[in-house]
Amino acid sequence: MHTKEKPYACDICQKPYFKSSDLITHLRTHSKDKPYACEICNKKFSRSAHLTRHLRVHTKEKPFACDICQKRLSDRYNLTQHLRTHTNEKPYACDFCNKTFSRRSSLMNHLRTHTGEKPYLCDICNKTFSQRFHLNRHLGTHTNEKPYACDICQKAFSERSNLTQHLRTHKKEKPYACDICPSAFSARFNLNRHLMTHTNEKPYACDICQRPFSEQSNLTQHLRTHTKEKPFACDFCNKTFSRRSSLTKHLQTHTGEKPYACDFCDKTFSQRSLLEWHCYGHIQGRNQLYVTNVIKHFLVSQL
């Protein structure tokens, strides 16, 4: 006879478990203990199953196959997610607005647009964030410490994960593949963002005008159109901007930096859009030259 009793409870949050092993695993979420280390890249994990799944990033092993299209996946979770691209299943529903999602993580992000919950706290300035990723990125603005340097180009990063992602730009490695189209990405975050172009999920809604967005960063940018906030200031002239990209573009008017070089004539530009317009002129010119030579050849052949 089986009982539903869960005799093993966490002393910190009182969550109960059937097995003592499950309680031990849970306690690591409080202690941040990660005893399972990858022998290849030294990344650490709290569960042996997570280490096993991670190792397949290195070995490229994909033991799980889709019965419908035979695409192979590295773990059962990704296979489950992939199957929903065939079935269009969205099992995760919002209790507030009944919007449905194919991924639990998308639902959790969406719920915070209703609750306003920001569970990730900065220990330095007490600013809170709705996602851990945004907190980690924010912490780098306080310390400016960048202990992880690229061996190839010496660019430094505040987080090891950012260095790992950067190294893929040198190796042209893109381990995160879209299950729906042939696109592949160097970072999981970029894959998750891309997937929303297929599902049309927009879990982030503006509290003021209810306009929805597929990414938190786009919502943040949009909110500044309401608040008129311009948090990015120029160190040279104190001009402020609502977008970091606008500040970066503006700084080049002071530094004279022109990082975008033309492959045709080596001319450099401060903005990518100016380079693209310039290259278009080369292409049009070459097409015109080709047409002129064809006409000349035709006229000569008629003599």
Image (cartoon, helix red, strand yellow):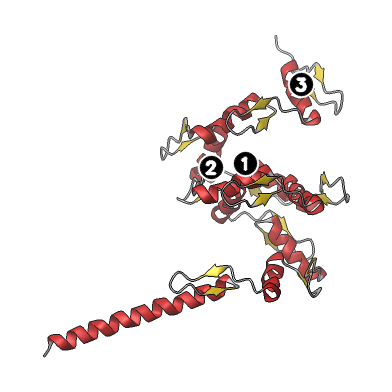
| Relative height, residue 114 to residue 228 (above, below) | above
Judging from the image, what secondary structure is the residue with disc 3 in?
helix
Judging from the image, what secondary structure is the residue with disc 1 in?
loop
Judging from the image, what secondary structure is the residue with disc 2 in?
helix
Seen as rendered, the residue at the extreme bottom is 303
Please indicate, yes or no, whether residue 4 appears anywhere in the rendered image. yes
Reading the image, the residue beneath label 3 is 23
Amino acid type, label 2:
Arg
Amino acid type, label 3:
Leu
Mark 1 or mark 3, which is nearer the start of the sequence? 3
Please indicate, yes or no, whether residue 187 appears anywhere in the rendered image. no
Packing grade of label 1 (10 A; few <14, some 14-19, many >=20) is few
Distance from Cα at disc 2 to Cα at disc 3: 32 Å
Reading the image, the residue beneath label 2 is 84
Mark 3 or mark 2, which is nearer the start of the sequence? 3
Reading the image, the residue beneath label 1 is 91
| Relative height, residue 81 to residue 201 (above, below) | above
Q: Are marks 3 and 1 in contact (CB under 8 Å)?
A: no
